[in-house]
Image: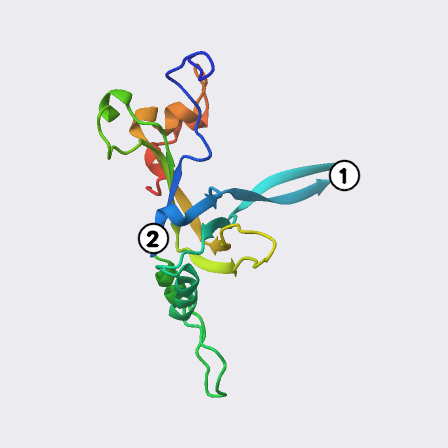
Amino acid sequence: MSTFWSQAALEPKRQFRFVLQLGPFESYLITKVNRPSFEVGESEHNYINHKFYYPGRVTWNDVSFSMVDAVNPDSTGILMKMLMASGYRFPNFSSTTRTISKAEAVGAVGTCVIQVLGTGDPDILAGQSGAQAQVLESWTLKNPWVKSVGMGELDYGTDDILSMDVTLKYDWATLSLSSEQGGATDRLTPKNATGPLGKVPDSLIGGGS
């Protein structure tokens, strides 16, 4: 079996090779993001002196990212505009009764895609100043909306770049793998293994039926 520690041509995915495409924000402003994750609930059944467990509902965990607070375009201003576009209004008057709706909140965020990048083919990249890396995987958040925003901390004692933390809530996420990896089935199923994983079509993790 070929492994990345025995062959120089193979290597693992790296944390710094990623791009987050999110609505109005420039990708280079995003400094950190966690990939989508999920939890499977459980149902417990007691019988005499024994406990049995059955898998339940799937819950997708929040996705959080950190970003630089740029001046132009102003990142803080964009986040506040996204809040207003979600339907929020300041309670300046007693007649203000407008509230946030899911449709508007999702529309304010727009498309959210997390791409994990590879290095690319050296033969293709040679001599190309604008060549792009291979996209190993693409996570697409379905119906994302802004759950929380941390505007960052001001401090006389440091000259660090001001950054903000944003948390997104979403319904579910789909995964698209690079065809050059051999597809989802080959990646998820060990050599000479049998079982249900080998019957999972690649289209399922991408949201197909």
The kind of residue on which mark 2 rests is: Thr
Nearest the camera: 39 or 27? 27
| Image quadrant in which you'd find residue 31 | top left
Q: Position of residue 140 (x, y in %)?
A: 37, 46
Query: Residue at 35% of width from left, 59% of height from top?
Result: 72
Residue linked to disc 2: 111
Query: Residue at 39% of width from left, 51% of height from top?
Result: 142
Nearest the camera: 181 or 43? 181
Most extreme residue toward the right is 49
As displayed, is residue 91 above or below residue 197? Answer: below
- Checking the image for residue 93, the label placed there is none
- The Cα atoms of the two marked residues, 1 and 2, are separated by 51 Å
Here the colouring is: rainbow
Most extreme residue toward the bottom is 94
As displayed, is residue 88 above or below residue 154? Answer: below
The kind of residue on which mark 1 rests is: Ile
Query: Residue at 48% of width from left, 49% of height from top?
Result: 65
- Checking the image for residue 48, the label placed there is 1
Q: Is residue 88 left or right of residue 126?
A: right
User: Considering the numbered disc 1 on the image, is that residue within a helix, a strand or a loop?
Assistant: loop
User: Considering the numbered disc 2 on the image, is that residue within a helix, a strand or a loop?
Assistant: loop
Q: Quarter of the image containing the C terminus?
A: top left
First along the sequence among labels 1 and 2: 1
Q: Answer whether labels 1 and 2 touch (C-beta < 8 Å).
A: no
Using a 10 Å C-alpha cutoff, classify the residue at mark 2 as few (fewer than 14 neighbours), some (14 to 19) or many (20 or more). some
Q: Position of residue 176 (x, y in %)?
A: 34, 37
Query: Residue at 43% of width from left, 49% of height from top?
Result: 172
Q: Position of residue 6 (x, y in %)?
A: 45, 11
- Please state which of the two labelled residues, at mark 1 or mark 2, is closer to the viewer: 2
Using a 10 Å C-alpha cutoff, classify the residue at mark 1 as few (fewer than 14 neighbours), some (14 to 19) or many (20 or more). few
